[in-house]
């Protein structure tokens, strides 16, 4: 049985597109919480 590990994480924040690209390149995780209809209107371009 595995033990549960609790870790304090930094508060989520909004960032501009250029900062988002830099953070993603550094290994950040992007969590898209938009509804499906919102994604249809404006999808993210592939990064990398």
Image (cartoon, rainbow, N blue to C red):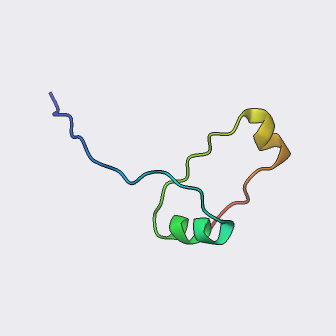
The answer to which of 42 and 15 lies nearer the viewer is: 15
User: 32 above or below 2?
Assistant: below
The tally of labels here is: 0
Q: Position of residue 16 (x, y in %)?
A: 65, 65
Q: Residue furthest top?
A: 1
Q: Residue at x 81, y 49 (%)?
A: 42
Q: Residue at x 17, y 32 (%)?
A: 2
Q: Quadrant of residue 35?
A: top right
User: 42 above or below 20?
Assistant: above
Q: Quadrant of residue 33?
A: top right
User: 47 above or below 32?
Assistant: below
Q: Residue at x 82, y 41 (%)?
A: 40
Q: Residue furthest right?
A: 41
Q: Is residue 40 left or right of residue 46?
A: right
Q: Position of residue 9 (x, y in %)?
A: 35, 50
Placement of the C terminus among the 4 image quadrants = bottom right
Q: Position of residue 6 (x, y in %)?
A: 24, 41
Placement of the N terminus among the 4 image quadrants = top left
Q: Residue at x 68, y 39 (%)?
A: 34
């Amino acid at each position: 049985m595995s033990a549960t590990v609790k870790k304090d994480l930094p508060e989520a924040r909004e960032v501009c597109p250029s900062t988002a690209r830099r953070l993603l390149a550094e290994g950040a995780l992007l969590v898209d919480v938009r509804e499906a209809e919102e994604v249809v209107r404006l999808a993210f371009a592939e990064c990398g």
